[in-house]
Image (tube, rainbow, N blue to C red):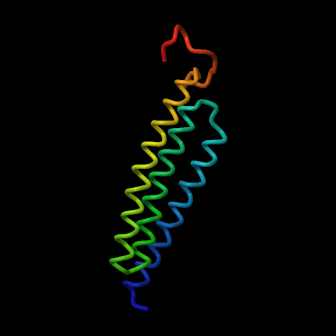
Amino acid sequence: MTTLQWIRLLLGGVLVLGGAFFFITAVVGNYRFQNMLYRMHAAGVGDTLGLGLLVCGLALLSGSVVFTLKLVLVLLLLWLGGAVSSHLILHMEMDNGRNPNGTGGEKENGKR
């Protein structure tokens, strides 16, 4: 292997491990935080950053343009789906009368 291939392999491995680290910290954040908004933030940021690093690392390791384009398409779809699902979860919680600050309870005067 040439020096350039070793650098690509090392950088790709570091990016994949970095992505896995952010996924693990997002899971820990979901269990650690009590507030629903903090949990959604931990999941959203950890998922976005972890997935981005993971896809960049796999793109470097693959060396194939077609595979890299497929990974980028999956990345874009998951980023779009994550944002929409977070928005829908928050509105569902508010429509069910839960306070997004984690205190629970009923709706006050029919307002969100």
The residue lying furthest to the right in this view is: 31
**Residue toward you, 11 or 43:** 43
On screen, residue 59 above or below 44: below
**Residue toward you, 71 or 97:** 97
Q: Residue at x 50, y 32 (%)?
A: 90
| Left or right position of 85 against 32 | left
On screen, residue 22 above or below 17: above
**Residue toward you, 22 or 85:** 85
Percent x, y of residue 13: 50, 72
The residue lying furthest to the top in this view is: 109
Q: Residue at x 57, y 37 (%)?
A: 39
Percent x, y of residue 74: 42, 62
Quadrant of residue 21 within the rendered picture: bottom right
| Left or right position of 28 against 55 | right
Percent x, y of residue 84: 43, 42
Percent x, y of residue 24: 60, 54
Q: Residue at x 56, y 55 (%)?
A: 23
Please give the count of numbered marks on the rendered protein: 0
The residue lying furthest to the bottom in this view is: 1
Tell me the quadrant of the picture where the N terminus can be found: bottom left
On screen, residue 29 above or below 101: below
**Residue toward you, 74 or 53:** 74
Q: Residue at x 55, y 28 (%)?
A: 93
